[in-house]
Image: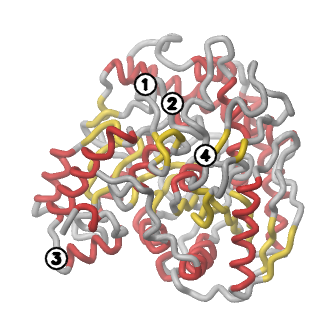
Amino acid sequence: MPDSVLAQHDAIALAQLIRDGEVTPREVTEATIARIEALNPQLNAVIYPMFEKALAAADSPNLPNGPFKGVPMLLKDLSSTTSAGDPNHLGVRGLKQAGYIHPSDSELTSLYRKAGFVIAGRTNTPELGLMPTTEPLSYGPTRNPWNTDYGAGGSSGGAAAAVASGMVPAANASDGGGSIRIPAAMCGLVGLKPTRGRVPLEKASNVYVLSVQHVVCHTMRDAAAILDVSAHENGGIALPAEPFAASVGKDPGKLRIGLMDTSPRYGIELHPECEAAARKTASLLESLGHSVEEVSLELVSEESIAAFGVVWSFGVAADFEMIRERLGRNLTEDDVEPPTWQMALRGKEITGEAVEVAVKALEQHSHNVLSWWQDHDLLLTPTSTLPPPRIGDLASTPANPFQGQLRAMPYAAFTSPFNMTGQPAISLPLHQTTSDAATPNTTPDNTTPGNTTPGEWGSTVPGLPIGTQLVADYGREDLLIAVGSQLETTSPWRHHRPPLHP
């Protein structure tokens, strides 16, 4: 079976082919290796191939007989998916230069292996997963398979580019501010962010967990079935009575859905293509019998934004301590990128009292936001306020180390609020850009970052994926899966792939 044919299958279909004896785990793994070798020079999605280990696992009589036996998988190079005897550099130059090797599998990696996945490599990520584009100085930029002049999103950009190009059917991803949903939107994939605590997190903040783990993939059934093998009961989040996979194709009934297609923050404009994506999805949902109404909802407040920044910076400072332990020495400015260094300095100045205040502010804000779901089932928004950025659009400079972060803020305006609340949310690939258009050149304080002028950065071209986000109440991934599979049936996207060939 040609590699290009295998690349059109999702993880469930590949697993079925293997169970039926039509292909072997080794043949599928060899096909994956061939596509990575052919496409990765164009995309820079896989930064550490693990081909010998993957072939050995595929050939092993001890390969677990799980639901995904023999299906290749890639791990994002952050700390919650470490793999024994392999690099784990977090996008950090100092760890790469030191040649750091992690000694053990994380809990989530172990669950993937138990399910039968064959780990074929590690994917690119921005430094510490801090940006919505994947362009670390340590490993260079990951490019979008739909147009390699553009970025694949972040921080799971390497994972998204690999899956969109058919290297693997699904790849591990994580989301602390939109890092599953944004790259899924930019690469034309399904990106489900589970409820906070649903999936094991190796390194969780002791104060307020923003990040969650899952995958980017092509189909709703993969998103659901992989969640079934990785979900656990933790922090009071009970597992549902039936598997998540049972919600695929299940009739959710007539739902009350709120449409928010205006910018969630002052000073951030909503690109017309992103607005069009949300409205297109609203029409599809109405055609399915759901009730959709335009709503105005305060997703963030000045207090919650400030609190998010405190927790985020505090987390970066904690990451520095972890890296210091790995290196056996203190970090220097040469080990990390300038904005990361500055953020860590800020984080080190944050007191325990300030963190407690921030946590209480986030908890109160989450309570206020979640109350909206008492009268609604789902919220519909664009995934991002902007289409994919060009490579380099979100870059910082030595003179302005925070320029990239200022430019990045609009990309997470619709996604990061639900990292604050911990709700499940999903990005679905239901739209593409249709014309040349300039991206609004704005930041939350309505100022132009750096010494640029409108139109100097952020233009776009036809044919780039645009995602639509659905958000459910706490713990209701099943509802997202049911509605997502309705939309998938109505407007199939599974075989809509980028024009990229090995």
**Location of mark 3 (residue):** 22
Q: Is the residue marked by circle 2 packed among few (<14), some (14-19), or many (20+) residues within 10 Å?
A: many
- Left-right relation of 117 to 454: left
Badge nearest the viewer, 4 or 3: 4
**Disc 4, SS:** loop
Tell me which numbered mark, 4 or 3, is placed earlier along the sequence. 3
- Left-right relation of 136 to 111: right
Badge nearest the viewer, 4 or 2: 4
Q: Position of residue 142 (x, y in %)?
A: 45, 38
Residue drawn at x 59%, y 29% is 316
**Location of mark 1 (residue):** 138
- Residue closest to the far front: 436
**Location of mark 2 (residue):** 127
Q: Amino acid at mark 3?
A: Glu
Residue 489 in view: yes
**Disc 2, SS:** helix
- Position of 309 relative to 317 (above/below): below
**Disc 3, SS:** loop
**Location of mark 4 (residue):** 388
Q: CA distance from mark 1 to mark 3?
A: 41 Å
- Left-right relation of 24 to 332: left
Q: Is the residue marked by circle 4 packed among few (<14), some (14-19), or many (20+) residues within 10 Å?
A: many
Tell me which numbered mark, 1 or 3, is placed earlier along the sequence. 3
Q: Is the residue marked by circle 1 packed among few (<14), some (14-19), or many (20+) residues within 10 Å?
A: many
Q: Amino acid at mark 4?
A: Pro
Tags 2 and 1 touching, CB below 8 Å: yes
Badge nearest the viewer, 2 or 3: 3
Q: Amino acid at mark 1?
A: Ser
